[in-house]
């Protein structure tokens, strides 16, 4: 039987680990195969436009399956090939069906028979922790309709994007740029957002988390909400892959607290859902797929569906496999069909994202997943006097991520933005940033964590902070796509940066329609409401 290399499956060597023995042949493994989308991209984009413009309502899960799911004939072919190699086909969820995912289970020996040339080894990090990983490409039976093969490699694929505010050294207090003790709710008020008016619109938002505690942090939310004089939003953890809740002392718990507070403190009468998954390419994307088909949360006897899902985790686009990026592109499409906006952090390590060349952070670099960039402000007396890009690498405070994709071409909606080409490839590409918000640690919110108040920044705050604002606008004005509104009128919804940044390779100016570094700018309450109200009238 002839086999061929699966395009897009190349996996780079695992850095920082020691390669050990090959996995035992009788070890049972799980994996996911993805088949091509049943509808053409042209058809899907046409339906998305109908949903975004209000011509038709957001699609049901059954309707999404018919567009972004699998061709039944393709599924039969894959099932047959999997079964004859002694591998078990696992039950499919609605999320799987909506994204063409076929979940399978078998021994390593059986997987080697299904994919000749497959080699999985155990690797150890410096702390002795073991992980299974592979290098190079995967092969499958020639002619099989498989566009992606995930899950056998169990390495971590995403990092948190938060930064703690730290002093300049022993005995040297760092100057305050904003009043002390402001939570995300206080920061929104500082920016001019009328939080009491926002409270009257009940909405449901979610964040994806790949580790840490997502149960006990609800108690910290209650304490903070009480201090703010508001209710604590309903909060729940949903495991999308069966993973257990992490430890409160895990590093990722600070990340989760930042996500939760940024959403919940601007939505005290609504609900926030933590969509928890393992930190692998298969589990991470699976959590996003789960969100697209999530049925919602019951509040006061009414089921309310998700408006926005935020992601504060990511990794350089160049570090992802090509088939994984295309899986995320499918999620971007399905989310818009469902009337859900994904907003993802662009990273905290500048345009190179801890690599040796300019690359945006994924999944913020994926079309229809809005990238949240970072800025800082000066407001020592309680009035904002300056909005500047977050670029604090000299003192170790990080820098907003941003960039032009080397994988995805510009969206049609970006044609008017006069985007530069990629500094790495020299070719046109999709730009990650849509809007920016508070991310510089000196401008970040105060969190209650481990019985202490800490000030935290990062694009991990920008993403959920923007998500809370976007969900409010969507609920108030009844439109399905925040991102569609952004691409159409983003420059009319914002306050632009007031201090230019000449950092290479994509400098930002104070008078641009759009900057790669900061997107359209920082969402303004009055301007955003005015643009949304105008769009509502046109759609009526």
Image (cartoon, rainbow, N blue to C red):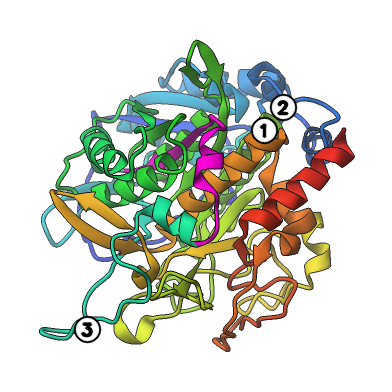
Within the magenta stretch, is there residue 410?
no
**Residue that carries the numbered disc 3 in the rendered image:** 168
Looking at the image, residue 368 sits to the left or right of residue 354; the answer is right
Rate crowding at label 2 as few (under 14), some (14 to 19) or many (20 or more) other CA atoms within 10 Å.
Answer: many
Q: Residue at x 34, y 50 (%)?
A: 258
Labels 2 and 1: the sequence-earlier one:
2
User: Do the numbered discs 2 and 1 sit on residues whose CB atoms are within 8 Å?
Assistant: yes
Q: Residue at x 51, y 50 (%)?
A: 9
**Residue that carries the numbered disc 1 in the rendered image:** 339
Q: Residue at x 35, y 27 (%)?
A: 236
Rate crowding at label 1 as few (under 14), some (14 to 19) or many (20 or more) other CA atoms within 10 Å.
Answer: many
Determine the CA span between mark 2 and mark 3: 50 Å
User: Do the numbered discs 1 and 3 sit on residues whose CB atoms are within 8 Å?
Assistant: no
- State which quarter of the image contains the C terminus: top right
- State which quarter of the image contains the N terminus: top right
Judged by depth in the image, the label closer to the viewer, 1 or 3, is 3
**Residue that carries the numbered disc 2 in the rendered image:** 58
Within the magenta stretch, is there residue 209?
yes
Q: Secondary structure at mark 1?
A: loop
Q: Secondary structure at mark 3?
A: loop
- The x and y percentages for residue 477 are 71, 37
Q: Residue at x 47, y 29 (%)?
A: 270
Is 407 drawn above or below residue 137 in the view shown? Answer: below
Taking depth in this image into account, of 337 and 12 the one nearest to the observer is 337
Q: Which residues are magenta?
A: 191-210
Rendered image quadrant of residue 452? bottom left
- The x and y percentages for residue 197 are 56, 41
């Amino acid at each position: 039987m002839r086999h061929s290399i699966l395009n897009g499956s190349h996996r780079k060597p695992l850095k920082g680990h020691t390669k050990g023995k090959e996995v035992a042949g009788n070890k049972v493994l799980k994996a996911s195969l993805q088949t091509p989308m049943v509808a053409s991209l042209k058809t899907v984009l046409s339906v998305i436009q109908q949903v975004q413009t209000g011509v038709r309502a957001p699609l049901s899960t059954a309707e999404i399956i018919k567009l972004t799911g699998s061709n039944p004939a393709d599924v039969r072919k894959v099932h047959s090939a999997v079964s004859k190699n002694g591998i078990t086909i696992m039950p499919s969820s609605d999320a799987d069906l909506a994204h063409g995912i076929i979940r399978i289970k078998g021994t390593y020996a059986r997987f080697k028979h299904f994919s000749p040339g497959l080699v999985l080894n155990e690797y150890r990090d410096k702390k002795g922790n073991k992980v299974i990983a592979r290098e190079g490409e995967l092969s499958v039976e020639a002619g099989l309709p498989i566009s992606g093969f995930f899950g056998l490699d169990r390495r971590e694929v995403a990092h948190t994007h938060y930064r703690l505010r730290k002093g300049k050294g022993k005995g040297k207090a760092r100057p305050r740029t904003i009043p002390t003790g402001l939570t995300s709710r206080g920061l929104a008020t500082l920016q001019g957002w009328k939080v009491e008016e926002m409270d009257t619109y009940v909405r449901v938002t979610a964040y994806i988390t790949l580790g840490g505690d997502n149960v006990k942090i609800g108690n910290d939310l209650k304490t903070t909400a009480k201090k703010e004089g508001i209710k604590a939003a309903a909060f729940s953890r949903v495991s999308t892959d069966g993973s257990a809740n992490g430890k409160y002392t895990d590093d990722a718990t600070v990340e989760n607290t930042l996500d939760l507070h940024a959403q919940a403190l601007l939505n005290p009468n609504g609900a926030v859902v933590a969509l928890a998954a393992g930190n692998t390419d298969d589990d991470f994307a699976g959590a996003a797929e789960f969100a697209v088909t999530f049925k919602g949360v019951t509040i006061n006897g009414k089921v309310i569906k998700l408006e926005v899902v935020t992601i504060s985790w990511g990794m350089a686009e160049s570090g992802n496999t090509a088939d994984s990026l295309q899986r995320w592109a499918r999620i971007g499409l399905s989310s818009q069909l469902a009337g859900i906006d994904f907003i993802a952090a662009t990273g905290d390590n500048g345009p190179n994202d801890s690599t040796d060349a300019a690359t945006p952070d994924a999944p913020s670099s994926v079309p229809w997943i809005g990238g949240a960039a970072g800025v800082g402000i000066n407001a020592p007396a309680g009035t904002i006097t300056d909005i500047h890009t977050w670029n604090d690498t000299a003192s170790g405070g990080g820098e907003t991520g941003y960039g032009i994709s080397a994988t995805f071409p510009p969206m049609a909606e970006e044609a008017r933005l006069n985007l530069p080409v990629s500094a790495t490839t020299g070719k046109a590409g999709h730009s990650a940033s849509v809007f920016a918000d508070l991310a510089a640690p000196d401008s970040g919110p105060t969190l209650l964590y481990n019985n202490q108040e800490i000030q935290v920044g990062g694009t991990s705050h920008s993403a959920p902070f923007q998500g809370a604002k976007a969900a409010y606008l969507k609920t108030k004005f009844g439109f399905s796509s925040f991102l569609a509104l952004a691409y159409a009128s983003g420059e009319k919804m914002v306050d632009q940066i007031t201090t230019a940044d000449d950092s290479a390779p994509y400098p930002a100016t104070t008078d641009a329609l759009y900057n790669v570094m900061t997107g359209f700018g920082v969402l303004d309450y009055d301007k955003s409401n005015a643009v949304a109200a105008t769009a509502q009238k046109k759609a009526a």
